Structures are given as structure tokens and as C-alpha cells.
């Protein structure tokens, strides 16, 4: 197997004979194994792209007869993580018999519902539009992938001839056509007219390859893609510099990151005209090669070719006419420069929709760009959530790879506008969108919760993520932050959070935190000032150090974080929420509490002052007052617990019960209770409320605000 591995330079040979042998005799298990290996190499296919299948004999439960069944990736799956539950299983004879009632291209979409009459396994995933493409071919194992190297040939002006010459007639060619029943018939016709071919190139689309076994199909796929990639590599530079050569110099990494962090909230605000978007930024070397080139302004407006690319990235990107070293310090000035470009893009998109729409086309969707290219700096993408934005950027890099390859061997051709529209506003795609779950309360929102590696801050962050937000997890304790990062990754996945070390009294770390949020997500919508500490001492024992520390972290920290948040929120101009986690102690006087209690009172009044000032910006400022939240609290792990126990004449271990008994509801307060209160303020039902205080203390009469 080592020899096999070594002969591939442009794709990854991952087949493990030992693992495969354990699956011998189970063709469906081998299909899944092959699919996962193919999906693990992004040079072979992109996220959610491609389709794999196998055909096996099985017993028909109704007749007891042996029948041929096709197992194929179901609609909406991703082959890198494909499991048996993601497959559809259909009777091949029934599927093929549908050609007897097929009435032509105008009736393509009607055929999809008929796939359900061919289902063999009642637990099947919904069959995808690619089902007939696999079904009409006779091979036991089939791979349909979207490798950049193959699409570069498929999207080249001379792609058909190049395919013929490169593979000596062993790879067939079918011109571009929207996936569907007729395309399946065309694949079968291509095979009939070219017996002995090992695959078919789909114009502007992708690649079909096959084999009699899972391994043969896998190996065939790798060999064909390897040949495509090697051919492209051999031709780079023969016609001249890649993308016409470099037009502008590459900015230093620190400049790229700095400019992107400053600009991202402005772009996000402009892209969020219809709903809150989440962003992604990359200055990948492939992006820089393209956006800094002489051919950028010629190629970018053409858009992409492969339907998978196009559906994720829209008709074309927005290219910013902005110098890489432009002064971005004045948001209003930058908006004045950028707004005409956004207006022009929306007008272009509306004109595209109007000129291409059909009588039954769905209503026009958001006209803002998904991909934004900033020459010299990088690529921004904006979509409904982080994963979708990140994947859109990855797909555009796929498109860049395709353009680079096609230009090296011929000239790049994109989908005609009408064909692109027919894909984007395909009624089947619209039906898929309508079936998707409704957005959660915080979908599209970006939150920074200070002190979120533990206690109340962690509980708030978890609640926000569960309701659709992305969160910047932070702490001033590196070890605690590392533990929290691992926990959030395991619970929610990498696209729900970013992390940064943050001391709320440190100006540089505060700036870094907001820059991190801008680069990771595009900006900030919700800031929860939760970081804190407590010192419980009689007045005579309080030191200047105690006093300064309390006021620096609790009061000045809240002020500084709010100040930085407001700067970002004003750039976005889409409003926002500031939530301050204060305390019952802001309202109630208690023993041995002069420093902490007065600092909490200052936090509370600072919140009122900020609410009064920021209303004009649609920034709401509200307060949640917890009391005695002991679970997972770093504060209570220190001297505070001992100090409070001493003040009340009880043992430390008896504090939870003591605090509960003094409440009207006789309840112990948990971090999750505070998180729920925060969600009440930011979840959309209280968008017209600001300057409020919500006590979550089990009912302490002395703390009643009114």
C-alpha cells in the first residue's frame, strides 16, 4: 500500500486495507468508508458537495425475490461525515422504469416526488436530485465529486477537447445541464456511445467515476483527479504569470489583520440590512494571489461555474475599491466610501433577478453580497451563521482554484446568468430552504461575555450558543480558558465560539478581544459584563489595594468594555445590547461589604447613565442582579465565602441553604438562572426595554427596585 500512497502527489491516498477487510461483505459499509475517505480530502470535494453510491442485491420483503438496490447519499448530506442514516436506498428497476413516464425537461421537478415510490429502505433519507445520475449507470460503485482540478478543466473554454486529449478518450464529456432526470439519461447515453470509458466530465460542474468494487472506484477517482491536477500544475506559467501577474503588493500579515479587524464591523452592518449576519475573514495565500492580481477585475464579475460553488457564494463577489493602506479610523467616512458600492451591488442583483425570473420563481432573496474581496487584505464572507459564512469562503477559494486552473490551460467560463439563476431560484432548492428549521432567538447574533470560562459567564455563554449565537469566550486565567475551550468545542463545535485572554482592566487586551471578535465573526451585538471579584472585610481592614482592585475590575472594567463595545456597535449601526451582571448588593446594605457593595452600586448607576446616553444608537443597556450564585464560582472558591460566612455567623458549607432560606421563594440560585434572565433581555421579546433591572435572587424584599 505504501507504493500506492507514494504515487499520488496532488490527492491523499487514505485507504487502509486492514480497516477495509473488517468491512468485507458489507458493500454499504464499504460505501460509507469510501465516502468518508473521499470527503476527508478537500482537494477531492467540498463541504456538502458530491455524491456516492453502491448497488447491491437484497431480498425484497414483499416478494422474497432477490432485487437490485442502490444505496446513495441522501439530500443535504456531507460525504466526509456520512453515516447509514444519511443514505437513501431505492429499487433500481423501479427508478429506471420512471423513464417510461418522463415527459421532458419542462417536467424535471415532477420526477423528484416519484423517487419516493422507489424507496426500498423505509428509514431512507430523502433521495437527492442526483439519484438518477447514479441510477442509470450500471456500475456497482460510483463517485460524483467536485474536485477543483477537474472543474478547472470542465469550466475551461476548451474543456471538452482538453479532456479528450488528456485522457485519450477514456473520460467522456457531457455539456452543462442542471442536475436532474434528463442529465441522468445523458450520462447513460454518453456511456453507451463511449464503451469502456472510466468516467465522465460534466461541463462546468464536476466528475463522475466508478468501479466494480468500493476500492476500484476509490482508486479510479484518485487517479483521474491526480491526472487533472498534474496537468494543471504542468501548465501554470506557460501562458504567462498566474492571473496576469501581481498588480498590487502583498501587505504584511499584521497590516492585513489590523485593517480587516477595523473594517469588518462596517461591512457587517452594511450586509445586515435585512437581518443580522455573521462574518468570516481569511487572508489565505490563494485568496491573496487572486485579489492582488491584474485579472481580478476581469474574472471576479464572471462568478463561479460549479453549482455547489454558486449556491454558496452568490452570483458574484463585491470587490472593494479601497486601498490596502487606507485610513479606516473614521467609520462615517469609510461608510460614505463603501455605501455606493453596496447600493450598486444590490441594484445589480435586483436587475439579475428581474431579467432572469420565471412566473413561478420565489421572491427575491437578500440582495447583499456574500463574498467581499478587499485587494491587498483578504476575503470577507457574511451569512446567517458562522459555519455558513466560513463554508462560503471555502467555496470561493474553490472557485479561485478553478479560475486559476482554467486560465492556465485555456480561458475560464462561468455559468450563463440564466443558468445560474435557474439553480439559485430552483423551486426544489426553495423547498429545501423552506424545510429548514426556523432561526433561533439569537441566530445571527455575536456575544462577548466577560469572564466566560466559568461560573455565571460560562452558563450565559452556553445559553446564548444554544439559542443560536456565537460567543467570544474569555478569561484572565489561561488554564481555565483552555479547559473552557475544550468543553465548548466538544459540546457545540468549532463554529460557535472563539477564545481570547482578557483582563478587563487592560486596554491592549480589550482591543485584542474586540479585534478577535471582528475577525472571527464580524463584530459584536451583545456584551455581557460579567467578570468580577469580591472582597469581604470590615471597613477597618480594607486597604487601598482592595478598594482599587474592586473598582478597577467591577466599575472601570465595565466602563472600558462598554466603551469598546459601543465603538464597534456604532460602526455596525444595527443596535445592540449591553447587559451588566451586578448584584443584589447594589441595592441592599450588608455587613463587611463597603468596597464590594459600593462598587456594585456604581456599576448599577453607570448602567442607567449608559442607557440614557446610548438609546439614540438603539443600544439597550440593562442589568441583571444575581445573589448568592455559588455553583462553579471562582469568587466563592476564595476568601469571599469565608468572609460572608463569618459575617452571617454560619459555616461555609451552610451558605447555600442560608441564602436560600432568607429568600421569599426559598430557592438556591444557579448560574443557569442568571443565563435565562440574560436571554430574556436579548432574545427579542424586550427590544423596546432599556435601563431596567431584573433581580434573580429568589426574592429578597430589601432588594426590590420599586
Image (spheres, rainbow, N blue to C red):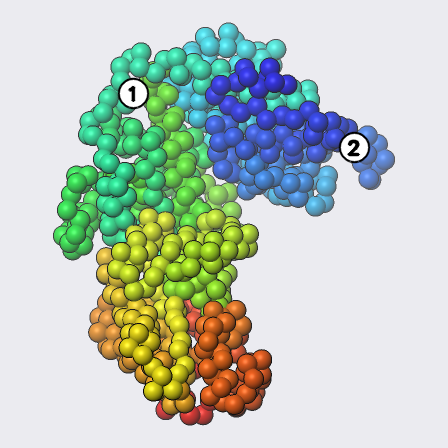
Q: Is residue 448 above or below residue 152?
A: below
Mark 2 or mark 1: which comes first in sequence? Answer: 2
For residue 494, side relative to residue 196 (left or right) = left
For residue 598, side relative to residue 495 (left or right) = left
Q: On the rendered image, what quadrant is the C terminus found in?
A: bottom left
Q: Is residue 643 above or below residue 523?
A: below
Q: Is residue 200 above or below residue 678?
A: above
Secondary structure category for the residue under label 2? strand
Q: Say which of 495 and 206 sits in front.
A: 495
Q: Is residue 704 above or below residue 673?
A: below
Q: Residue at 47% of width from left, 53% of height from top? A: 482
The image shows residue 210 at horizontal and vertical percentages of 61, 21
Q: Residue at 72% of width from left, 41% of height from top? A: 121
Secondary structure category for the residue under label 1? helix
Q: Say which of 434 and 685 sits in front.
A: 685
The image shows residue 663 at horizontal and vertical percentages of 52, 89
For residue 679, side relative to residue 526 (left or right) = right
Q: Which residue is mark 1?
A: 242
Q: Say which of 458 and 144 sits in front.
A: 458
For residue 25, side relative to residue 161 (left or right) = right
Specify the label residue 271 is tagged with: none
Image marks 2 and 1: residues in contact by CB distance under 8 Å: no
Q: Residues within 10 Å of mark 2 (few under 14, many from 20)?
A: some
Q: Which residue is mark 2?
A: 58
The image shows residue 44 at horizontal and vertical percentages of 50, 27
Q: Residue at 81% of width from left, 34% of height from top? A: 59
Front of the two marks 2 and 1: 1
Q: CA distance from mark 2 to mark 1?
A: 52 Å
Amino acid at each position: 500500500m505504501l507504493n500506492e500512497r507514494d504515487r499520488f502527489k496532488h490527492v491523499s491516498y487514505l485507504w487502509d486495507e486492514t480497516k477495509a477487510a473488517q468491512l468485507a461483505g458489507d458493500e454499504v459499509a464499504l460505501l460509507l468508508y469510501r465516502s468518508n475517505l473521499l470527503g476527508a480530502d478537500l482537494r477531492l470535494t467540498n463541504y456538502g458537495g458530491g455524491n456516492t453510491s453502491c448497488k447491491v442485491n437484497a431480498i425484497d420483503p414483499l416478494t422474497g425475490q432477490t432485487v437490485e438496490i442502490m444505496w446513495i447519499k441522501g439530500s443535504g448530506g456531507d460525504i466526509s461525515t456520512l453515516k447509514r442514516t444519511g443514505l437513501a436506498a431505492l429499487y433500481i428497476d423501479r427508478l429506471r422504469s420512471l423513464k417510461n413516464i418522463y415527459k421532458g425537461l419542462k417536467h424535471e421537478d415532477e420526477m423528484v416526488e416519484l423517487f419516493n415510490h422507489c424507496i426500498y429502505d423505509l428509514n431512507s433519507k430523502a433521495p437527492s436530485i442526483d439519484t438518477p445520475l447514479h441510477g442509470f449507470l450500471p456500475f456497482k460503485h460510483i463517485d460524483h465529486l467536485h474536485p477543483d482540478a477537474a472543474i478547472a478543466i470542465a469550466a475551461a473554454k476548451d474543456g471538452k477537447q482538453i479532456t479528450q486529449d488528456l485522457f485519450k478518450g477514456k473520460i467522456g464529456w457531457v455539456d452543462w445541464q442542471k442536475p436532474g432526470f434528463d442529465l441522468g439519461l445523458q450520462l447513460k447515453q454518453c456511456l453507451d456511445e463511449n464503451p469502456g470509458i472510466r468516467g465522465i466530465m460534466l461541463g462546468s460542474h464536476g466528475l463522475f467515476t466508478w468501479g466494480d468494487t468500493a476500492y476500484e472506484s476509490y482508486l479510479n477517482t484518485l487517479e483521474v483527479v491526480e491526472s487533472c491536477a498534474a496537468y494543471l500544475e504542468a501548465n501554470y506559467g506557460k501562458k504567462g504569470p498566474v492571473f496576469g501577474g501581481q498588480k498590487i503588493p502583498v501587505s504584511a500579515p499584521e497590516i492585513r489583520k489590523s485593517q480587516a479587524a477595523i473594517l469588518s464591523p462596517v461591512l457587517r452592518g452594511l450586509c445586515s440590512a435585512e437581518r443580522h449576519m455573521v462574518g468570516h475573514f481569511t487572508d489565505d495565500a490563494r485568496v491573496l494571489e487572486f485579489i492582488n492580481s491584474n485579472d481580478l477585475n476581469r474574472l471576479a464579475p464572471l462568478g463561479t461555474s460549479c453549482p455547489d460553488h454558486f449556491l454558496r457564494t452568490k452570483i458574484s463577489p463585491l470587490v472593494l475599491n479601497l486601498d490596502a493602506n487606507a485610513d479606516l479610523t473614521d467609520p462615517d467616512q469609510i461608510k460614505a466610501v463603501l455605501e455606493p458600492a453596496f447600493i450598486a451591488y444590490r441594484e445589480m442583483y435586483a436587475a439579475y433577478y428581474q431579467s432572469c425570473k420565471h412566473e413561478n420563481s420565489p421572491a427575491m432573496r437578500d440582495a447583499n453580497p456574500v463574498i467581499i474581496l478587499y485587494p491587498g487584505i483578504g476575503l470577507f464572507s457574511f451569512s446567517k451563521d458562522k459555519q455558513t459564512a466560513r463554508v462560503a469562503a471555502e467555496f470561493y477559494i474553490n472557485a479561485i482554484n478553478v479560475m486559476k486552473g482554467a486560465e492556465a490551460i485555456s480561458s475560464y467560463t462561468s455559468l450563463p446568468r440564466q443558468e445560474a439563476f435557474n439553480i439559485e431560484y430552483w423551486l426544489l432548492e426553495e423547498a429545501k430552504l423552506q424545510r429548514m428549521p426556523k432561526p433561533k432567538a439569537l441566530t445571527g447574533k455575536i456575544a462577548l461575555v466577560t469572564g466566560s470560562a466559568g461560573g455565571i459567564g460560562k452558563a450565559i455563554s452556553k445559553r446564548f450558543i444554544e439559542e443560536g449565537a456565537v460567543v467570544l469566550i474569555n478569561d484572565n486565567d489561561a488554564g481555565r480558558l483552555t479547559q473552557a475551550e475544550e468543553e465548548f468545542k466538544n459540546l457545540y463545535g468549532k463554529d460557535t465560539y472563539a477564545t481570547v485572554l482578557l483582563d478587563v482592566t487592560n486596554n491592549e487586551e480589550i482591543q485584542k478581544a474586540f479585534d478577535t471578535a471582528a475577525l472571527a465573526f464580524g463584530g459584536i451585538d451583545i456584551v455581557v459584563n460579567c467578570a468580577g471579584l469580591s472582597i469581604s472585610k470590615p471597613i477597618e481592614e480594607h486597604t487601598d489595594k482592595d478598594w482599587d482592585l474592586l473598582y478597577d475590575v467591577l466599575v472601570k472594567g465595565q466602563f472600558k468594555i462598554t466603551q469598546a463595545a459601543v465603538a464597534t456597535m456604532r460602526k455596525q449601526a444595527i443596535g445592540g445590547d449591553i447587559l451588566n451582571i451586578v448584584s443584589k448588593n447594589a441595592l441592599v446594605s450588608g455587613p463587611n461589604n463597603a468596597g464590594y457593595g459600593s462598587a456594585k452600586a456604581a456599576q448599577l448607576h453607570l448602567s442607567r447613565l449608559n442607557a440614557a446616553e446610548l438609546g439614540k444608537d438603539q443600544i439597550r443597556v440593562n442589568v441583571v442582579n444575581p445573589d448568592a450564585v455559588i455553583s462553579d464560582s471562582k469568587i466563592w472558591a476564595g476568601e469571599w465565602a469565608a468572609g460572608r460566612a463569618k459575617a452571617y455567623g454560619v459555616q461555609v458549607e451552610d451558605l447555600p441553604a442560608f441564602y436560600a432560606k432568607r429568600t421569599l421563594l426559598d430557592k438556591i440560585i444557579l448560574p443557569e438562572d442568571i443565563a435565562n434572565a440574560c436571554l430574556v433581555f436579548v432574545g427579542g421579546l424586550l427590544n423596546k426595554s432599556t435601563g431596567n433591572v431584573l433581580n434573580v435572587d429568589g426574592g429578597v424584599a430589601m432588594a426590590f427596585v420599586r
